[in-house]
Image (cartoon, rainbow, N blue to C red):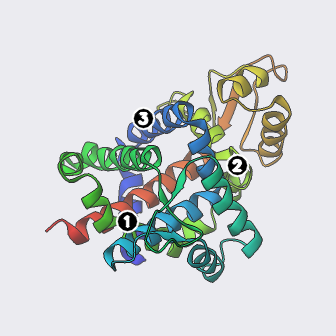
């Protein structure tokens, strides 16, 4: 993982990376708002990693001539990688089927509990890769997105296993700093982080950076969250000094700490480094 760490550090050191991170936050927030049910699969670090693992198993099955993601294989893989318990993995699989994010695979003879990503989920995955490959292109003038547009799912099938392996092996991803983890461990925490970063002036100086958020209720409504959940999550983040109110609580601009912004940027840099390494491995 030394290569990934070096690449991530290089990205973080570039002055233009701040604007790239800001645009990523805006785009990630827009994607979540466009498909909130699908976005819920990525709402915590645990569910996000399980989703990437599921896609990796799906592509692996296609490559081996055994299409379909079986519940048994998924649950075993989740447990093997230490992501969740069997019960949690089973419930996650059932939820994805229930909401049409996964759909049953029709095979002969019929096999129970075998699924594949639904078209909408697959389209969202391509959009997610487009966002991240586009960020890399913006930093080095590459043409990764153009290749994605040409090859679509064929390119994802080539690179996703490497991306999933990289994410699962990354200490930075699996064990983020407390300022990031306070959000990543709760439902819709990822969406809240994206909203916070999207709402600030990324070029602002100082240790506390003002956002354009002045109300917990407005923040909750913009993300379709309950007021109680949003308030509880912000309170936990405030207790860790990730954010706070510049004046009267709930009636003044919310600020986020520079350390939190750097923690968020660090995760984005590591993620981009992993994606770029996987892309580079098949780009020849």
Instruction: Identify the residue at horizontal 61%, vertical 40% (top origin).
Output: 37
Q: Residue furthest left?
A: 284
Disc 1 to disc 2, C-alpha distance: 25 Å
Q: Is residue 11 visible?
A: yes
Mark 3 and mark 1 lie on one chain; the one further toward the N terminus is 3
Asked if 90 appears above or below 128 in the picture, the reply is below
Q: Secondary structure at mark 3?
A: helix
Q: Earlier in the sequence, mark 3 or mark 2?
A: 3
> Which residue occupies the foreground of this view, 159 or 142?
159
User: Does 282 sit above or below residue 186?
Assistant: below
| Picture residue at 52% right of the left edge, 66% below the top | 54
| Above or below 224: residue 229 | below
The residue to which callout 2 is attached is 183
Residue at mark 3 to residue at mark 2: CA–CA distance: 20 Å
Q: Nearer the viewer, mark 3 or mark 1?
A: 1
Badge number at residue 11: none
Left or right of residue 226, residue 130 in this image: left
Whichever of callouts 1 and 2 sits on the residue coming sooner in the sequence is 1
Q: Nearer the viewer, mark 1 or mark 2?
A: 1
Residue 152 drawn at (x, y percent): 26, 51
Write down the residue under mark 1: 160
């Amino acid at each position: 993982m030394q290569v990934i760490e070096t690449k991530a550090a290089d990205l973080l050191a570039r002055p233009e990376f701040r604007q790239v991170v800001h645009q990523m936050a805006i785009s990630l927030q827009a994607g979540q708002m466009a498909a909130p049910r699908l976005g819920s699969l990525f709402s915590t670090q645990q569910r996000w990693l399980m989703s990437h693992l599921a896609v990796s198993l799906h592509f692996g099955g296609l490559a081996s001539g055994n299409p379909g993601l079986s519940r048994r294989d998924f649950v075993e893989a989740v447990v093997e990688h230490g992501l969740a318990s069997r019960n949690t993995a089973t419930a996650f699989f059932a939820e994805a089927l229930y909401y049409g994010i996964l759909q049953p695979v029709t095979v002969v003879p019929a096999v129970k509990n075998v699924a594949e990503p639904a078209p909408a989920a697959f389209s969202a995955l391509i959009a997610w890769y487009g966002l991240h490959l586009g960020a890399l292109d913006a930093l080095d003038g590459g043409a990764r997105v153009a290749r994605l547009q040409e090859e679509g799912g064929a390119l994802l099938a080539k690179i996703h296993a490497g991306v999933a392996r990289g994410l699962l092996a990354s200490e930075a991803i699996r064990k983020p700093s407390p300022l990031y983890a306070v959000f990543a461990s709760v439902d819709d925490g990822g969406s809240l982080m994206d909203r916070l970063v999207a709402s600030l002036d990324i070029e602002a100086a100082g240790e506390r950076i003002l956002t354009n958020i002045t109300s917990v209720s407005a923040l909750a409504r913009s993300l379709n969250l309950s007021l109680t959940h949003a308030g509880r999550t912000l309170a936990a983040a405030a207790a860790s000094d990730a954010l706070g109110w510049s004046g009267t609580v709930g009636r003044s601009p919310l600020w986020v700490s520079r350390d939190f912004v750097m923690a968020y940027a660090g995760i984005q840099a590591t993620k981009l480094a992993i994606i770029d390494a996987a892309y580079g491995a098949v780009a020849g």
